[in-house]
Amino acid sequence: MSTTPPPQDPWAGSGSGEEPPPPPGGGYPPPPPSWQQPPPSGGYPPPPPAWQQPPGAYGTPGAGYEPPGVYGGTPGGTLAGWWLRVGATIIDGLVLIIPNYILRIAGGSVGGPLLSLILDAAYITLMLSRRGQTVGNMAVRTRVVDSRTGGPISGGKALGRWAAEFVLVILFFIPWVLDVLWPLWDRENQTLHDKMAGTVVLRDPY
């Protein structure tokens, strides 16, 4: 029988409570991989690569500006309150009252109302499609935008929005009152004609 003792583990202790000798190479373990390393001093991690940064973050193009809108994933925008909307409607009525009066006199009992209706439709359609604001919106600093994209509305959508409100007006008193009061309890502060046209009114930050 061989009497050669088994090889001893160089890292094992002597059994007397002594710590094992340090590993070779200076006694320091290798550093952890980069994905396990703590953030640099200051407590803030480095910014992500540019292709991972959202618009307006870390000084990328668009910083300091967010497009209006609150729906469909579009950032930014604060819903306009009911009183701002009423104020804009009243101001627009004052803007159109004199031109409408002149057209009604010039057009007579038949042509006058028709010319007045065309003026109202043209005013709303052109103002909202070109700048998103009527004179009343500009006065109270609100803006009409697409509820899905948060961007400007087209001429067709602006005309449809006016037509939806006009239909509710000619359907007698109760539908029109409901349309006017609907933003008071609606989660998105929309009137009925906003919902029919797919628009929303936001406060203009500029």
Image (cartoon, helix red, strand yellow):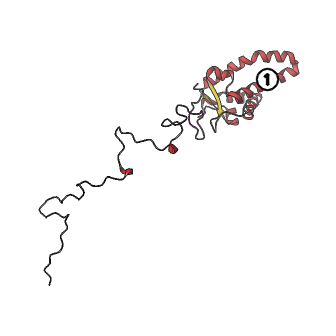
Numbered disc 1: secondary structure: helix
Name the image quarter holding residue 166.
Answer: top right
Q: Is residue 62 magenta?
A: yes
Q: Quadrant of the C terminus?
A: top right
**Observer-nearest residue: 57 or 4?**
4
Residue 202, x across and y down, in percent: 61, 29
Dot 1 alpha-carbon crowd within 10 angstroms: few under 14, some 14 to 19, many 20 or more: some
Q: Is residue 3 left or right of residue 49?
A: left
Q: Is residue 35 left or right of residue 176?
A: left
Q: Which residue is the site of mark 1?
A: 119
Q: Is residue 33 left or right of residue 6?
A: right
Residue 132, x across and y down, in percent: 67, 28
Residue 71, x across and y down, in percent: 60, 38
| Rendered position, 171 above or below 19 | above
Which range is magenta? 59-79
Question: Extreme left residue here?
Answer: 16
The disc labelled 1 sits on which kind of residue?
Leu
Name the image quarter holding residue 97.
Answer: top right
